Image (cartoon, helix red, strand yellow):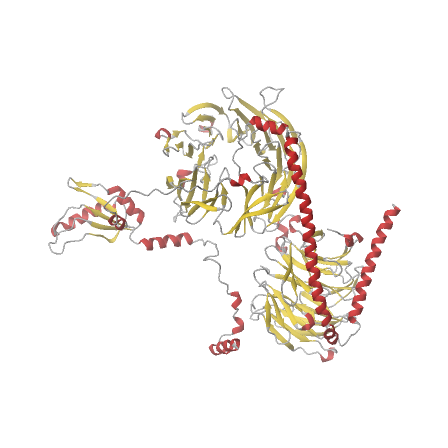
Amino acid sequence: MAELDIDTRAAKLGIDWSQVNLDSIQLPPGENFGIESDDEGVYHDDQLEFDTGFGNIIVVDNLPVVPKTKFEKLENVLKKIYSQLGVIKEKGLWMPVDPNTGMTLGYCFIEFNTPQEAQNAKEKTHGYKLDKSHIFAVNMFDDFDRLMNVKEEWEAPQTKPYVPGENLQKWLTDEKARDQLVTRSGPDTEVFWNDARQKNTELVHKRPYWTESYVQWSPLGTYLVTLHKQGAAVWGGADTFTRLMRYQHNMVKLVDFSPGEKYLVTYHSQEPSNPRDASKVEIKVFDVRTGRMMRDFKGSADEFSIGGPGGVAGASWPVFRWAGGKDDKYFAKLSKNTISVYETETFGLIDKKSIKVDNVVDICWSPTDSILSLFVPEQGGGNQPAKVALVQIPSKVELRQKNLFSVSDCKMYWQSSGEYLAVKVDRYTKTKKSTYSGFELFRIKERDIPIEVLELDNKNDKIIAFAWEPKGHRFAVIHGDQPRPDVSFYTMKTTQHGGRVTKLGTLKAKQANALFWSPTGKYIILAGLKNFNGQLEFFNVDELETMATTEHFMATDIEWDPTGRYVATAVTSVHEMENGFTIWSFNGKLLYRNLKDHFFQLAWRPRPPSFLSPEKEEEIAKNLKKYSKKYELEDQDVSLLLSEQDREKRKALKEEWEKWVKQWKSLHEEEKLARQSLRDGEVSDEEEEEDEAKEVKEVEFEDVIEVTEEVVQE
Amino acid sequence: MRPILMKGHERPLTFLRYNRDGDMLFSCAKDHTPTLWYADNGERHGTFRGHNGAVWCCDVSRDSLRLITGSADQSAKLWDVKTGQQLFSFKFGSPARSVDFALGDKLAVITTDPFMERTSAIHVKRIAEDPEDQVSESVLVLESPNGRKRINRAVWGPLNQTIVSGGEDAVLRIWDAETGKLLKESDSEVGHKNTITSLTKSADDSHFITGSLDKTAKACLWDMRTLTLLKTYVSGVPVNAVSMSPLLDHVVLGGGQDASAVTTTDHRAGKFEAKFYDKILQEEIGGVKGHFGPINALAFNPDGKSFSSGGEDGYVRLHHFDSDYFNIRI
């Protein structure tokens, strides 16, 4: 009835009801589907200005009290002072006058075009001496409310009772010693256990629209940071992920942790409205635990980036590079001709001075010590050679330097425990038409830091990738020409050659363009990403043998878990199809796949360094059999249980299906007559069909027999 | 398993249909001539000439005497299978997308595309015993509530009481075939998230399966009466065609990357594979490769011992299963 009413009503109003689809009207969950509109930032900013409204007004106090005759003169003086500091709005200067006496009251209001100008004017003129008896007192108009409400008497701040926090490292105490990983796909961000035994993931926490751009683990795995319009937030805790702290920074784009997780650096840049201007950059450094902002840096993008060797501009993230070690003591910024090194005690420059190095283009910290390596390219058309130098911080003493000739580019690679530094040097050939590459290898921990020069067997080979073995003394290089380059392994330590770098071996013609060492060393994945469509070769460098060659088609990302037991390879949404990730064992055995559409990111939760001493680790490695026994038994139990569970699950599924089919069959039987009548009474129909079905089955059995016969013949 | 390659069409295949006895295979393609093949050896038996546009769909009567085809030339035609002669032509103002004979072959459901001012619609036609008596009037016309979105497929429900339709709006609908009332819509929570490309009934009409371009590209089995989702098969690539084995509990999905993107990516990226799944356990069993374009059509022989696939590449591949196929245990 109600529908009829609506229909007649619609007809009256001339609405074609059939054209209106109510179901197509769906109210979005949340305000904006979690999708941020491109102009949201602009829109938001506008609103902010409306809300506060008076943010661009300042109040100037302690002005001379003047009669009407001198009013104009004073006004002009004020205008002169303040128009230097910003644009005063039309009729934006208002000096109240006592209506009885005609005298001014000794203060005025000035309205600027923008709150920034007002702020600037306040800072610059507060305490300005107009003359001996008139010293300006300038306040923001908005501050007045706050200032008026200050209580007369001082109140002692209350001490809050201490609430013990959650164990932020509980995930490390997992009984099965599993590792966690976070993925982003579609709107969801999910944290999983990688349960390789069960060949599946176990969900820890899932939340749609958890972050507005990406997520990142802190270097020791304690926190997960999410980015939002208002700033960044870190999450962690014992069981579920709870928000531990927020860091206010509007429209934050990038974040970076200090290696010891003490500080968080957030980055925001605003495209300039005038394309000729450089974009504005704001960087804040927060204390992770307290959430306090320690220092902020503002400026144009040029100040935070330097022209690269090819003259390419653009801020390279991270802008601030943290010195190695857990102390988080120093961080450095590179800008034109200067290196600014800050220390975190005062968040000021060391010795209050930057280090001046003409034309420096690249700096790199040692991962463990406060040693900075820097590269200065050739100048004056080759008159002044290029230079690689090591500088000790905070003493700023140059530990070692090397001049290099006819260099086109340099790249520095530190070994993860800071023992070696490899510098890849691209040199021009004599004709200057082409370049060739070689390495300069620094042994940091040895006396006087000896330098060795390494050239590849074929000097003209292009170097495609380079990687140090983590915590080890070996490195791998992909060199040669595409599409089938060679891969070589070198060691810095051998017994025969004393302290000389030696080649371990070369693998010819590999489909690889990226190297992924296991975090524990020894194993490496030679990966062919992009053009090679995800070729993977799992290689054991100790034995120099290939463990497995496989493929994750179109893989874009490869990441070892922090223990070096498993590898995740992922196809992210740059490709349309087969998005998701695959987990492999360290030796290239496929463990399980997980398909997820619109897959954006995968990251293993890092682990803090082990507390075991090297001796203890060695002892465990030696007696591995003894220790592993227990786990092998567990593995067996699990796999038994798993197959049992699997069988039961299948049985249940089959039963459920049977039940459904049976139910349907009885219904089908009831309708038999109706069906026959629809077919003009083809009575024998149903039976005939059933007979046919039986026949078919008989034929199937025949097939089986034939097969066994063949076996006998063989 | 050696496939028989049937090269008779010059354009991409659109639809494949076996007759009830399983000895004939009808194929439709974007060229204008539906073709009849011997389902056993893949020899061409004949063609049906008369359409002037891509042929999207066909259906054959239970007695294998009549064929109905729907075409982009804005008509659906009835054919005499024996002679290949056109018996009747239903004219529409927009392309006919899908056709389906009802139980007893006295009714047919034809869907039309949205075109110019017209919205997508489902037409029910009465099929006369004698072609002389055939009239073109529709018994019933159903307008989709989301008419600008194309209905890709409509089939008859049990006892011709209902019609099930699915299309670009990703919603499955059950209509009353008598009154034209919309009875049920699929739950958008569990249902497809993108265009439903294909809809195939099981051999015993108890359930049906739909393929979709949606995110995970899945096929769902739906209870024919209650429209409850029974199973989901995740394919990872867009699904263009689905079929179910009448003999074993197997489901086969075909599809692949969109044809327009094929030339720009690696040939293996397409995944132009007919993928087999266990119907009950929803696990992938295997795949049959061979096409070098997306698979647009799939059909099982009613005896369940062979199946054929039609691709964007213009080939029909007829596969007779090896004996070990019938002994697969997972």
Which quadrant holds residue B76? bottom right
What is the x, y in percent for residue A112?
27, 50
Q: Which is nearer the eye, B267 or A115?
A: A115
Q: Along the horizontal axis of the image, is B3 left or right of A458?
A: right
Quadrant containing the C terminus of chain A in the rendered view: top right
What is the x, y in percent for residue A497?
61, 20
Can you see residue A481?
A: no
Hey, which residue is sitting farthest bottom in the picture?
B133
Placement of A110 over or under A415, stated as above or below = below
Q: Along the horizontal axis of the image, is A237 left or right of A660?
A: left
> Residue at 44% of width from left, 48% of height from top?
A228
Q: Along the horizontal axis of the image, is A463 left or right of A135?
A: right
Placement of A343 over or under B288, stated as above or below = above
What is the x, y in percent for residue A55?
30, 51
What is the x, y in percent for residue A161?
38, 42
Which quadrant holds residue A520? top right
> Residue at 40% of width from left, 25% of height from top?
A395
Which quadrant holds residue B189? bottom right
Q: Which is nearer the eye, A93 or A545?
A: A545
Placement of A313 over or under B235, stated as above or below = above
Q: How many marks?
A: 0
Can you see residue B106?
A: yes
Hey, which residue is sitting farthest right in the picture?
A713
> Residue at 51% of width from left, 35% of height from top?
A608
